[in-house]
Every structure is written in C-alpha cells, then in structure tokens.
Image (spheres, grey):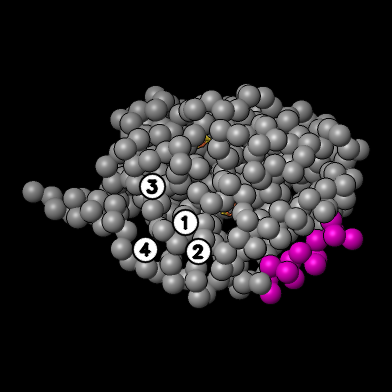
Amino acid sequence: MNVIRPLRTFIASHQPLRVISRSIRNVFFPQKRVLNRMITVEVSTLCNARCIFCNYRFGYRKKSIMNLDSFRSIAESSIRLGYEDLSLTSMSGELFTHENAVQIIKAAKAAGFNGIFCFTNGILIHKHNIEELLTSGITHIFISFPGFSEKLYEQIFKVSTFSDFKKSIQMLLKTHKSLDSKVKISFLPRTYLTLREIKDSEFYRSCISHYISDLVDMDEPLYFYDTWGGDIDSSQLVEGMTVDLNPLKSIHPFKKTYPCNMMLRFGILVNGDVRLCNCRYDSTIGTTKDSLYIGNIADHNNLESFMLANKVKIEKMRHEYINGNMPALCKKCPMYTPVDFNSYFNYIKSENINR
Ligand code: SF4
Ligand code: SF4
C-alpha cells in the first residue's frame, strides 16, 4: 500500500509546520526588502479553463477584453508614474485569449517597461506567433498546469485541452531554444501530484526535461490554495489539494501587526476599474462595494490624473489597513504578505502619486 500520499494529505490538511513557521514570520519577521515598482494591467477577463481552485467559474465578472489603444495609454501613463515592471496577469482571465496579446506586450515594451511578465495556462500559446512572442519584450512566462495528462486537465482544470497545451509547450520550448531566447519560462504545477510524479510522466521526460536550464524551470507543486474570500473550500478541491488555513494569515486581528505588501500594488482591470492589491476578488467585484476598489479611469484623462484625484482615498485605505480597519476582502485573505514598516513607508514616499 502506498502510504506516502495519505501521509502527505494528512500533513497538507493539518499544515502544522506551515502554520507555525508562517505565523512566527508574520508576527516577528515581516519581509524587509526593496519593493519593485510593479503595476498590473489586465487585458482579458476571458478564460479557456475552469480550474477547481479559481473563482472564475462562478461568473462574477463580465467577459471582455481591453483594446490596444486603451492599453497603450495606460502603459505610457504607468511609465510616467515611475513603474518599471508590468504584470499582464489577469485576476481571472487568460492573456492569450486576447487575439492581440503579443501586440499588447510589444506596446508595453515600447512604452518603456523593463520587466514584463504573465501567468498563463499556456493552452492557447500555439495560436500566437511564438517567435514574435519571445522577441516581444516579455521577460518571464509563468505557466500553470495540473499535470501532464488529459485526465488531470479534466479533473483539475475542468477542460479537455491537454493536446492544445502539449502543442503550445512543444512549440514554445523548441522556438525558445532555436532563438537562444533569454525569456524565462517557469512551469507551475497546480495539482495533487508530487514533483517526482510530474517528472516521471511521459510528456515531461520526452518534451520538457531536456530544455530545463537556468531559463526554463519546474517549480514545486502548489498544494495550498486561496479561499477567494471564502468562496472556495477544500471540499471543492481534490484529495492532496487544500485551501490555506494558516490562522495568522487568515484571521484579520493578527494582520494588524504589519501592513500587507500587496496594499502597495495597483491593478487596472479591463473595464478601467482601479483596485489596490488586485490579486484577489469576491462577488462584490465590479461594484463600489468591492473593498479594494478605488475608482475608474474613464472619469479621468489618464492614469496619472486618476492617481492624483484619488490620492487621499488611497492614503486612507492604506492607513486604515495599518490601524486594523482593513478592507473586508483582506480580513478573509490568506495571501497576506507582511512587510516591515521601513520598507513600506520608503516605498510610499517614492511613489509619484504622492507628489
Ligand atoms: S486558468 Fe487561471 S483564470 Fe483560468 S480558471 Fe484557471 S486559475 Fe482561473
Ligand atoms: S491581505 Fe490579501 S487581499 Fe489584502 S492586500 Fe494582502 S494579498 Fe491583497
């Protein structure tokens, strides 16, 4: 009998070491670091998967894409605001559902971004010009996948698209090698499999292993998932995958200790809504009840004038967080990443929106 998986499942569901170590870190050792000047712009709210750990499948958001001109304006404004790095990761959408995904990346590069990255499920990459993608200015592609079989796609991503994924990855890695591309490609397993089991799969051995290098890597599987504001619990996942239960990350009184790193981030949604953090949302998304919502850029000439007009509101939201009156979503969010006060306030002082 294989005792490894039940043992791992037990440890995963009880998370003792994780709870203790993260809790100690949260209370005593917040991150001390220079935070990079990064902004997120979402260009598509469409996704071609229905992952069991994501709230996309609840359909809270209107499906739409951002046009190239709107994106260009936001990108240029972001550069004038001092942002250097861009995430094109949609909160619940897939970059490559946008037919102009590569043009979007090129426009970001032309605007002046240094680092441009995205998280993608990779399934649709083969529909784009891969050579153009790898020379577009993108610097890092993070590819999430449930394992390398149709069964795993159906079980975890809830779609039968493994053959498309395979095609995309084969084309991507082959082109990456032939171009001697410096774009970093990271594979992110979202599964109950162990890394060993992933590496033992036929697709990994025949199509990926020989490309592994400093630029192409395979991460450890993620076993702990966000609850998306309480919408997802472990019963919706499969054995070996569980929601993050760390109490000192999830119970809001403990979060008073330090501010969350993500309160320094802004995200611009397809519809022009601007949010703080923007890594998670709940059913209030798209309404003024959304506790991380700041406003919409449509009411302003550009992102700079939006930031200026909302400076006081942003300051208030951040100030309230530190004083324990945090946004409703933060109270339920296990993605809390504490940052020390020096790093936090130094970053805020350096923000152009405060000038
Ligand atoms: S691919 Fe990403 S956005 Fe789409 S359902 Fe999965 S986790 Fe959500
Ligand atoms: S606690 Fe969660 S939702 Fe709140 S700012 Fe941090 S990561 Fe974002």
The label on residue 243 is 3
What span is in magenta?
A: 342-355
Mark found first going from the N terminus, 1 or 3: 3
Marks 1 and 2 in Cβ contact (< 8 Å): yes
- Of marks 1 and 3, the one in the foreground: 1
Q: Amino acid at mark 3?
A: Val
| Callout in the foreground (3, 2) | 2
* Residue 77 rendering spot, x and y as whole percentages: 85, 46
Q: Is residue 70 left or right of residue 187?
A: right
Label 4 and label 3: CA atoms lie apart by 13 Å
Of the numbered discs in the image, which one, if any, rests on residue 251?
A: 1
Q: Amino acid at mark 1?
A: Ile
Quarter of the view holding residue 338 = bottom right
Label 2 near ligand 2 (CB < 8 Å):
no
Q: Amino acid at mark 2?
A: Phe
Query: CA gap, disc 1 to disc 4?
Result: 15 Å
Does residue 132 appear to the left or right of 19 in the view shown?
Answer: right
Q: Secondary structure at mark 2?
A: helix
Question: Circle 1: is it few (<14), some (14-19), or many (20+) Cα within 10 Å?
Answer: some
Q: Residue at x 69, y 27 (%)?
A: 65
The answer to whether residue 266 of the structure is visible from this angle is: yes
Asked if labels 4 and 1 touch by Cβ distance under 8 angstroms, the answer is no
Does residue 208 appear anywhere in the picture?
no
**Ligand 2 has an atom within 8 Å of the beta carbon of the residue at disc 3:** no
Q: Is residue 343 above or below residue 310?
A: below
- For residue 254, which numbered disc appears in the image? 2
- Give, as a three-letter code, the residue at label 4: Arg
Q: Is residue 319 magenta?
A: no
